[in-house]
Image (cartoon, helix red, strand yellow):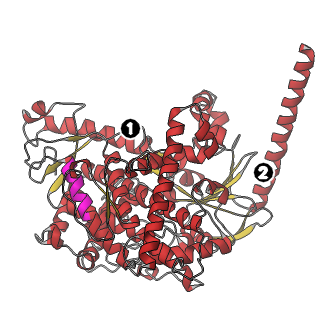
Amino acid sequence: MALSFVITTSLFVILCLLHYYRCLARNLSTAKASGIPYVVLPWNVFHLFWLATHTVWLPILELLPTSWTSSWLRFMHPEWAYLLGYKVFEDLGTDIFLTVSSGRLQLFIADAEVINQVTTRRNDFPKPLQMYKRLDIYGKNVVSTEGSTWRQHRKVTAPSFSEKNNELVFTETLHHAQALLRLWTDPSGREIKTIQDPAADTMRFALYVISRAGFGVRVLWPHEENEKQTGGPYETFVGSKPPPGHKLSYKDAISSLLENIMWTQVFPKWFLANSPFKFHKTIYTAMLEWGKYMEELYEAKKLEINSGQKTEGLDLFGALINGSGTMAGQKQALSDSDILGNAFVFMLAGHETTANVLHFSMVYLALNCSSQKHLQEDTDRILNGKPVNEWAYEEEFPKFFAGMGAAVMNETLRVMQPIINIPKSTEKGRPQTITVQGSQLVVPGDCTVSLNAAAVHRNPRYWPCVSEGSRNDLDQFRPERWLLKTNESNPSSTSNHTEEFDDEDMTGPSGPDTSSFLFKPVKGSYIPFSEGYRSCLGRRFSQVEILAAFAVIFREYSVELAVDEFATDEQIESMPKGGSERMKIWQKAADRADYLLRNTCTSIITLQMRDHHIPLRVVKRGSERFFFE
């Protein structure tokens, strides 16, 4: 019996090894024939098993002799693209290369021209839809579809992101940014609060903005719940208590779902519902509850539309329903489930990226005091003392978009991209020819294609340096690189053109990606919102929200690193202001923050700092403890 088991096991292992060798040899032969430089890996880094267990195996692999692992070990960390940036491409001497394993061929691109080829040839390089099928929690959507189905979704969803909606985003951001400051600060100025987890607060802020601008629902902060609320006839106010018929409040349902979205991507609904783990069942409950809220909002907005109430220029959900043809007697362009699917994707995509940019910007500005002062001075110049209640989108936003606030936003998106590797693919049996610096190369069929934002955003072929005497400061946060010198023409002005599409229904998001008054990157070299037909529809939505939030925060306040871990408030106050003692304490906090930014972020949907925090303090301008020239 034992002998039989040993023989069976041995045969199974031998067959597995033969299959592994055969697949690796096949993929290696394909890579050689492509003409593209390649790196051979022992297995597919993005396989689910490796993603779940790499922390166990990597320390073991690192014990092997360097001569065995030098060519491939650094690629075995799933976050290698974020950790290493452009250095990998620089070391390989190429801006495009393949990784080859027995399970997968994967192409990584840090060449702007090639990126442009891929994004404009959407039929040749479609999205790998298997990566997005779990986003169909409530229905198909513009993210999870391709071909003619995607065209229909795009045609209906794109008009929702209008200038009227951007105006609503601006107004709602002003409200919630002021509410966020009330959470972070003591209006009397007698107490300075340490914000232990600013990322969680910016996530709530962005969620509340998209809730109103996306769904017409004003979510109340805890300190607002006892205050009288007023709003338009379309406005719904929700607090922390669930309404009749619900187990969770509106904000608890969506917060719980979005904070745990990873589990919905790993496990199907039936597993979460029957899992022995309580938090899985909580996520399932949140999925059901948010679905009920969306259905209720859907029915309410259909009544508004059919009764002739004005919906154009209000929330995204209303515009989406109106554009899909819900008027009595019309044929709907999208099914009810498709409308709900797109509404969910609006919510998911509409808050994470913005929240991350606001969080990381504040940390970088706390680390770079001169850039923060520059932002404050530019904000003062633009507003000239005008109170918040007099700000107007059409007047203020263009100025913000052409100033230091936009430079800070753009630079944060450059060094801390929401999506590190933007995924594309080639279909099985359909290899595609690309041109790389004048040479024709072949991308194999059934190949995953990654537009490596972390690398192309640091490629010295496309970006100016700021630091004098520095050969390359592209790993550093330097928003001044976006500011053109007085009377200097835009060095890349020839690339500042309007995107051309083959169908007027397939147009991209409104407005340019960067202002003509700022440095204009070469097309394909700056892709935080992707590029081409599949670029992010909510780009302008996010830009408006970020810049309005900057203006509210930095017109009266400064952001500093909290140093509670290294010294008490009393100890800091006893040190001379601007002296070396304070500087040493600040430097400890700065070194810790810099390390965490460079080494601890992970990608699930977007790049975030999930298991670590960089505490901050928001203080009145003029009361800074750690502003050093």
Instruction: Give 575 or 465, whichever is nearer the viewer.
Output: 575
Residue under pointer 2: 28
User: Residue farthest to the top?
Assistant: 2
Q: Residue at x 36, y 74 (%)?
A: 314
Q: Could you tell me residue 330's position as x and y percent?
A: 57, 82
Q: Could you tell me residue 361's position as x and y percent?
A: 32, 55
Instruction: Give 171 or 535, whichever is nearer the viewer.
Output: 171
Quick check: 453 above or below 52? below
For the residue labelled by badge 2, is the local secondary structure a helix, a strand or a loop?
A: helix
Q: Is residue 100 left or right of residue 557?
A: right
Q: What secondary structure predominates along the stretch shown in magenta?
A: helix
For the residue labelled by badge 1, is the local secondary structure a helix, a strand or a loop?
A: loop
Q: Residue at x 89, y 14 (%)?
A: 2
Q: Which residues are magenta?
A: 174-183
- How packed mark 1 is, by other alpha carbons closer than 10 Å (few <14, some 14-19, many 20 or more), is some
- Specify the amino acid type for callout 1: His
Q: Does the rendering let one see residue 462? A: no
- Specify the amino acid type for callout 2: Leu
User: In the image, is residue 229 part of the stretch drawn in magenta?
Assistant: no
- How packed mark 2 is, by other alpha carbons closer than 10 Å (few <14, some 14-19, many 20 or more), is many
Q: Nearer the viewer, mark 2 or mark 1?
A: 1
Residue under pointer 1: 612
Task: Name the quadrant of the N terminus.
Answer: top right
Quick check: 397 above or below 559? below
Q: Earlier in the sequence, mark 2 or mark 1?
A: 2
Q: Residue at x 63, y 66 (%)?
A: 145
Instruction: Give 74 or 56, whichever is nearer the viewer.
Output: 56
Q: Could you tell me residue 456's position as x and y percent?
A: 50, 61
Occupied quadrant, residue 218: bottom left
User: In the image, is residue 182 part of the stretch drawn in magenta?
Assistant: yes
Q: Does the rendering let one see residue 214? A: yes
Q: Is residue 244 left or right of residue 46?
A: left
